[in-house]
Amino acid sequence: MNNESSYLCENCGEEIVVPIDFSAGSHQSYVEDCPVCCSPSLIRVIVDEQGEVQVNAQAEQDRF
């Protein structure tokens, strides 16, 4: 199991690497500011039964 993954920031296009906390469950979501442009994104992490990780990010302003 890899304990980090990445996503592309919708605001600046940079690839952002995030740590994966497997103890937090198979479906996780949280808001994190991009370390490059400081724009908030809603991060969703899904860990399947084989331990494969999928990370999706959506600009937080798009949620409303």
Image: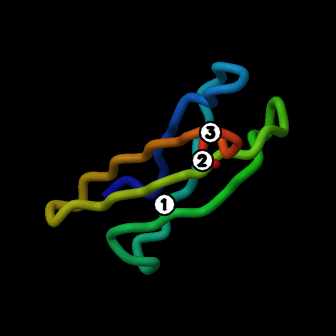
Which residue is tagged 3? 62
Quarter-of-image position of residue 59: top right
**Residue 19, horizontal then vertical, whole percent:** 55, 56
Q: Is residue 22 left or right of residue 12?
A: left
The residue carrying mark 1 is: 20
Q: Give coordinates of residue 64: x percent, y percent.
A: 64, 48
Residue 63: numbered disc:
2
- Badge 1 amino acid: Ile
Name the residue rendered at 75%, 40% in the picture. 34
Q: Nearer the viewer, mark 3 or mark 1?
A: 3
The tag earlier along the polypeptide, 1 or 2, is: 1
Residue type for callout 3:
Asp
Labels 2 & 3 near each other (Cβ < 8 A): yes
Characterize the local packing of mark 2: few (<14), some (14-19) or many (20 or more) Cα atoms within 10 angstroms. few
Query: Is the C-beta separation of discs 1 and 2 under 8 Å?
Result: no
Give the distance between the C-alpha atoms of the residues marked 1 and 2, in whole angstroms. Answer: 23 Å
Q: Is residue 30 above or below residue 53?
A: below
Q: Are marks 3 and 1 in contact (CB under 8 Å)?
A: no
Q: Residues within 10 Å of mark 1 (few under 14, many from 20)?
A: some
**Image point 64% across, 19% down: which residue?**
13
Q: CA distance from mark 3 to mark 1?
A: 24 Å
- Mark 1 vs mark 2, foreground winner is 2
Q: Amino acid at mark 2?
A: Arg
**Is the residue 4 above or below the residue 10 in the image?**
below
